[in-house]
Amino acid sequence: MGDNRIYINSAREDQPFGGWQEVQGNGQTHDALAAAGFGSRLYVFGAGTDNRIYVNSAREDQPFGGWQEVQGGGITHLPLAAAAFGSRLYVFGTGTDNRIYVNSAREDQPFGGWQEVQGGGITHLPLAAAAFGSRLYVFATGTDNRIYVNSAREDQPFGGWQEVQGGGITHLPLAAAAFGSRLYVFATGTDNRIYVNSAREDQPFGGWQEVQGGGITHLPLAAAAFGSRLYVFGTGTDNRIYINSAREDQPFGGWQEVQGDGITHDAVAAAAFGTRLYVIGKGVAVPAHV
């Protein structure tokens, strides 16, 4: 289904998505993508078919400039995670040794190189990352399928891995986003239902609850805060791409298909940047209508 090319769709607040278009640069990947808005650009990260790590970026309403290898020589066989925090853009990757690595760059500067995230965590799955308050958070699914979090203040080391309160178990990667006064983490349960957990700054997570709307997926999720809503994206069991959203402290409103008729067999990435909410996917095919 589809191909290994990289596609993007976007919407302004409270407007429909405009349709799928290929990201300029002719990039190809065999995995899902990561995306983050930082400074004056939207960045998309992907592992190439050579397992090297690449980045492409665009200014608002401008085309993407082309794929370049992220400095540092990293190699991974899994999707990445990205987040902007303070004066830096961060990208996280799972190494071929299953350890967790981070690389970062200031705006318009090269990436500084890959370093292991302090705490010694090991995972066989991709990561999730989000900036919230005074800390940068990274989430991982442990080899025991439990859900862990690590965090750091700007220019400080990570403090170590702790299990996210609530006892959740998943066999898939996570999604994370900061919205309003809370940090949210989303997970696909072992029953393929979609769950969310959240915490206020410097407070414990409150526990896992099913996202309203009854969605089911066998793939990882994506999340982003945009305007007055928190959005979560998932690939349905029919391989179509769906979205659900909630205002702060309100329930999620239900799953709707993202406009554009896209079909993919992979997870998608999401990011808010400027006046638009973006969703990015690998090999998004649009069926012909007769």
Image (spheres, helix red, strand yellow):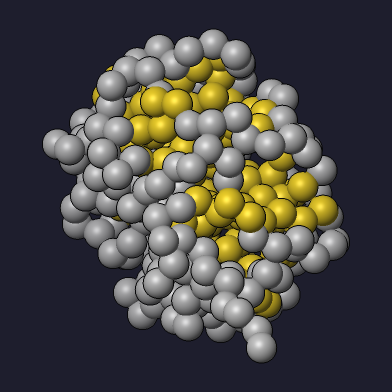
Residue 151 in picture, x, y percent from top left: 44, 31
In the displayed structure, 234 sits above or below 270; it is below
In the displayed structure, 15 sits above or below 39; it is below
Residue extending furthest toward the left: 97
Q: Residue at x 69, y 23 (%)?
A: 39
In the displayed structure, 31 sits above or below 213; it is above
**Frontmost residue, 180 versus 281:** 281
Residue 258 in picture, x, y percent from top left: 66, 69
Residue 60 visible at all: yes
Residue 194 visible at all: no
Residue 269 in picture, x, y percent from top left: 53, 52
Dividing the image into 4 quarters, which one contains the N terminus? bottom left
Residue 18 horizontal side relative to residue 281, left or right: right
Q: Residue at x 72, y 39 (%)?
A: 273
Q: Residue at x 26, y 39 (%)?
A: 51
Residue extending furthest toward the front: 290
In the displayed structure, 278 sits above or below 106; it is below
Dividing the image into 4 quarters, which one contains the C terminus? bottom right
**Frontmost residue, 100 versus 161:** 100
Name which quarter of the figure residue 68 lies in: top left
